[in-house]
Image (spheres, helix red, strand yellow):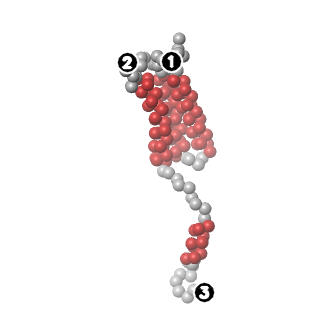
C-alpha cells in the first residue's frame, strides 16, 4: 500500500514490464523519403537508356533512335512515378501495393521494349 504520490499512477516497475512486453514497432519512413528513394530506383535505368539513346559515351555517336523509343520511355516513366507516389502515401494498403506492382511491371515491359529501339550498330537484331 502506497502512502504518498498519485494513487492512480501505476508503479514504475509495472510500467517498465508493460513496455518490455510490447512488440517492437517497425520503423516507418515518411512518404516523401519513400517516394524519393523510389524515384532514385526509377531514374537510374531510365537515365541510362536516355544516355545510350542520345549517344553519350560513344566516340562517333550512336546514331538516330527509332521513333518507338520515346513513347516507351515516357509511358514506363510515368507509370512508375505514379505508382511509386500512390504506394509511398499508403504503404500498408493492399490495393496500393497491387497498383505499385502493376506500375513496376509496366515500367519493366516498357524498358524492355525500348531496348530494341536503341541505336546500337553492333546489335544484329535489326535488319
- The extreme bottom residue here reads 3
Label 1 and label 2: CA atoms lie apart by 16 Å
Residue 9 image offset from top left, x and y in percent: 55, 77
Query: Dots 1 and 3: beta carbons under 8 Å?
Result: no
Which SS class for mark 1?
A: loop
- Dot 3: within a 10 Å radius of its alpha carbon, few (fewer than 14), some, or many (20 or more) residues? few
Indicate the quadrant containing the N terminus: top left, top right, bottom left or bottom right. Answer: bottom right
For the image, the number of numbered tags is 3
Q: Is residue 124 above or below residue 78?
A: above
Residue 54 image offset from top left, x and y in percent: 40, 23
Question: Viewer-nearest of labels 2 and 3?
Answer: 2
Q: Is residue 127 above or below residue 11?
A: above
Q: Which residue is rendered at x = 53% and y = 86% of the image? A: 4
Q: Which residue is mark 3?
A: 1
Among numbered discs 2 and 3, the one appearing first in the sequence? 3
Label 1 and label 3: CA atoms lie apart by 86 Å
Residue 68 shows up from this direction: no
Q: Which residue is rendered at x = 52% and y = 21% of the image? A: 116
Label 2 and label 3: CA atoms lie apart by 89 Å
Residue 125 image offset from top left, x and y in percent: 54, 16
Checking the image for residue 102, the label placed there is none
Q: Which residue is mark 2?
A: 60
Residue 96 image offset from top left, x and y in percent: 58, 42
Checking the image for residue 123, the label placed there is 1
Q: Which residue is rendered at x = 59% and y = 42% of the image? A: 97
Query: Dots 1 and 2: beta carbons under 8 Å?
Result: no
- Dot 2: within a 10 Å radius of its alpha carbon, few (fewer than 14), some, or many (20 or more) residues? few
In-front residue for pair 45/36: 45
Which SS class for mark 2?
A: loop
Q: Please identify the quarter of the rendering in which residue 98 is found.
A: top right
Amino acid at each position: 500500500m502506497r502512502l504518498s504520490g498519485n494513487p492512480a499512477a501505476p508503479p514504475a516497475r509495472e510500467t517498465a514490464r508493460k513496455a518490455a512486453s510490447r512488440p517492437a514497432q517497425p520503423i516507418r519512413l515518411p512518404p516523401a523519403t519513400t517516394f524519393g528513394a523510389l524515384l532514385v530506383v526509377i531514374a537510374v535505368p531510365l537515365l541510362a537508356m536516355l544516355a545510350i539513346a542520345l549517344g553519350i559515351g560513344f566516340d562517333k555517336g550512336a546514331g538516330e533512335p527509332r521513333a518507338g523509343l520515346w513513347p516507351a520511355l515516357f509511358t514506363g516513366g510515368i507509370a512508375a512515378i505514379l505508382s511509386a507516389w500512390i504506394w509511398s502515401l499508403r504503404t500498408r494498403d493492399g490495393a496500393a501495393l497491387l497498383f505499385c506492382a502493376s506500375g513496376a511491371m509496366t515500367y519493366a515491359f516498357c524498358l524492355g521494349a525500348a531496348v530494341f529501339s536503341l541505336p546500337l550498330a553492333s546489335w544484329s537484331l535489326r535488319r
